[in-house]
Amino acid sequence: MCVAQQRALGLASGEGCVQTRCQTLGLARSSYYYQPRGESALNLELMRLLDEEFTRHNFKGVLGLRDHLRLAGYQVNEKRVRRLVRLMGQELVYPNPRLSVPAEGITRYPYLLRERVLTAPNEVWSTDITYVPMARGFLYLVAVLDWHSRYVLSWELSNTLDVGFCLTALHTALATQPAPFIFNSDQGSQFTSQLFE
């Protein structure tokens, strides 16, 4: 309710008793007397520690910040850390892996394995990229798998999402196994680039 509405009702000027004014507004009397409490000394200390850690490592999420506070000897849960971070106005950075985005102008190929029955190794290989969380950011992992045996033929790690480490994984697999009939991928930009074809 705005001040003009309160004046019209005689609430802002102090006319009438508190009980009457609260009844008019439909509030409990305790709401009239309520004074918001500030943050406790412990929460202020936690916010100071969170700010220091966020300044040093701005890529940590709620769980990483919670673990940092626990290592410092504070027993906190993730809801408390999330509330304090929100209260501080900090924006947490979350990895947003866009691993299956095709490059512009690239032809999408049909999926050939829908009802295919695999009878022997090296008929179909598959590859995919995922990210591995690390203490300071994350790395990308590419793996080449044989679909029949579910054996990992090769894998590579990289801190960038370029085509080079994907090619290295493929060449390593081809050096140890005969080439498959079908090489399946999610057709992300690494696997549809001219270098990979």
Image: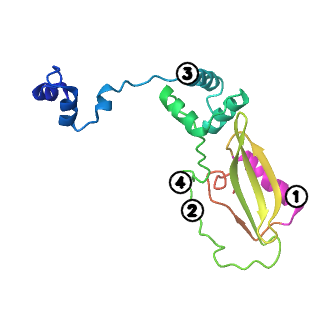
Locate the N terminus by quadrant: top left
Q: Residues within 10 Å of mark 4 (few under 14, many from 20)?
A: few
Displayed quadrant of residue 143: bottom right
Front position in the image: 5 or 166: 5
- Horizontally, residue 108 falls left or right of residue 173, namely left
Q: Which mark is residue 108?
A: 2
Front position in the image: 93 or 170: 93
Front position in the image: 96 or 172: 96
Displayed quadrant of residue 181: bottom right
The residue beneath circle 1 is 175
For this orientation, the residue located farthest to the left is 8
**Nearest-to-viewer mark from 4 and 2:** 2
Q: Is residue 143 above or below residue 30?
A: below
- Horizontally, residue 32 falls left or right of residue 127, namely left
Locate the C terminus by quadrant: bottom right
Residue 7 rendering spot, x and y as whole percentages = 13, 24
Q: Is residue 65 visible?
A: yes
**Nearest-to-viewer mark from 4 and 1:** 1
Q: Measure the alpha-carbon separation of dots 3 and 1.
A: 59 Å
Is residue 21 one of those drawn in magenta?
no
Three-letter amino acid code of the residue under disc 4? Gly
Per the rendered image, the range of residues in magenta is 163-178
The residue beneath circle 4 is 105
Q: Earlier in the sequence, mark 4 or mark 3?
A: 3
Three-letter amino acid code of the residue under disc 1? Ala
